[in-house]
Amino acid sequence: MLRDKRLPRSGIVAVGVAVVLLALSAAASASARVLTVTQRHVSYPHYTSVQAAVAAAHPGDWILIDRGVYVGPVRISTPGLHLRGIDRDGVIIDGRHRVGNGITITANRVWVENLTVRNFDRRTRDDSENGNEVWWKGGGEKSTTIGLHGWWGQYLTTYDTGLLGGYGLFASHAVDGFLKHVYASGFNDSGLYVGACRDCRALVQDALVERNALGWSSTNAGGHLVIENSTFRNNGLGIAPDSERASDLPPPQDGACDAGANRSATPTFASTNIDHCTIFRHDVIAENGNLDVPANHTLLGAPWGVGVMLPGDYADRLDGNTITGNPTFGVLVFEQPDPYPPTAQTVYFQAAGNRITNNRFTGNGTQPGGADIGLEGGVFGAMNVNNCFAGNTFATSIPAGIEGTWGCQNATTPNGGPALLSEVLTLIAQSGARHSHPQPAPHRQPTMPRPCRSVPRNPLCR
């Protein structure tokens, strides 16, 4: 088993590269066709809509899209397709602020690359079935099984300039995938989301996520999952993986390397010395206290201004990140009873076994009651334990001296104590008072170098 002591690439890269190479080989085989989509007057066979080309495609085909604005949703149910734009900023799938989703993928082994998807909206701000710009959809909210294997997205821009955009890039009940060189802004839920996978086997690299209610979300997602070399800035809340009882099943969020074998909603960890495979590393998490961004009711009921929030999270690792300018907390770890206030159905998710190491904290916690690092636990149970902190550069923590009692040099660490519970509730109340405003369209983003590379022969690439 790969050990996080060496900060491995979480097992995903070796497996992922093999899968990717096989997919590329299959897609570029002699039998693969290239279906071209263009709005120009050309002499060669082509399609004028992306959906028409998708409907005509066979497994393993390429769909290559010329520059232009293509209106309306795209639904992909054919496995093995490779959907690529010729220019990331010039190929636009446009929702025109109508209700629906941009590109929805329900088939295995589908690539989406080098294009922009914008302004597909929810019916209401809490409508989770619409408003998703690119969605690898392996199941519904109540599903408990993985329905999609193989999902890949790179050089993608997603944004919404209204108040009803839901998610930018969204993978649910899906495993074996990645997001690379991607952008998301203007969403009332989260810019990037990976959820409902006990062992996600997923990688996120070089993402820029800004001006969303939440930058990164991953409900009930863990195992081999790495988010690295990315920037989460100017969101209402930066990064917040979490455990939930009733949606994107099964719970919990569990970052241990053996999470795929876990069947408990409230696992326990006997020591700080465990293997972590859900890792946030070498990211910039900055100035996440923007109360002007769109927000749905879920985010209006969550703390604001936190760089990294771990509510009811198990066995995650934060390593080597720059966490700066977040007004309430740089990192905030706390237990999460769901639902709250507690009822007979409440599941008491603890925050246990998380490891926060080698991060650089500056300028966080400028709001009253805040700090660079905050740890709460023990109000709703005694198992909010074995979270540890080491090698961080920081000025303030609650409890004080957090790298002593809660240092990773200790085989076990206690609950964080109840002191921060009232502060968490205060931040929730403040969040609910925000006033949302539409966000601007982004600047141009870097396009894929040599977009015709690896594509079988076709007239667009002459």
Image (cartoon, rainbow, N blue to C red):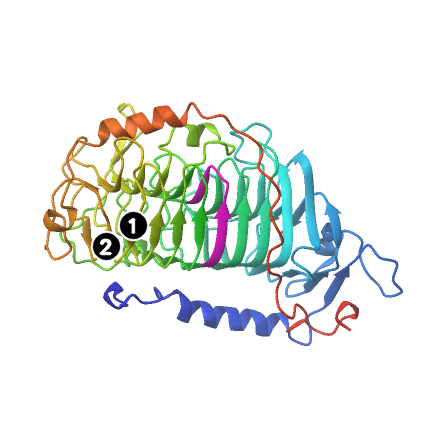
Q: State the quadrant of the C terminus.
A: bottom right
- In which quadrant of the rendered view does residue 142 lie? top left
Residue 128 in picture, x, y percent from top left: 52, 35
Please state which amino acid type lies under the numbered disc 2.
Answer: Asn
Tag 1 and tag 2, C-beta contact below 8 Å? yes
Mark 1 → mark 2, Cα distance in angstroms = 7 Å
Which residue is identified by label 2?
392
- The residue under the point 16% across, 44% down is 385
For mark 1, give the secondary structure.
Answer: strand
Give left or right: position of 332 versus 220.
Answer: left
- The residue under the point 80% across, 53% down is 48
- The residue under the point 62% across, 43% down is 441
**Dot 2 alpha-carbon crowd within 10 angstroms: few under 14, some 14 to 19, many 20 or more:** some
- Stretch in magenta: 205-216
Which residue is identified by label 1?
361
Q: Which of these two is toward me, 354 or 304?
A: 304
Badge number at residue 381 = none
Give left or right: position of 203 versus 425.
Answer: right
Q: Which of these two is toward me, 281 or 199?
A: 281
Give left or right: position of 161 versus 308.
Answer: right
- The residue under the point 55% across, 61% down is 109
Please state which amino acid type lies under the numbered disc 1.
Answer: Phe
- In which quadrant of the rendered view does residue 168 lie? top right
Which SS does the magenta portion mostly show? strand
Residue 208 located within the stretch drawn in magenta: yes
423 vs 219: above or below: above
Residue 406 in picture, x, y percent from top left: 14, 48
337 vs 137: above or below: above
332 vs 41: above or below: above
Q: Which of these two is toward me, 324 or 193?
A: 324
Residue 113 located within the stretch drawn in magenta: no
Tag count in the figure? 2
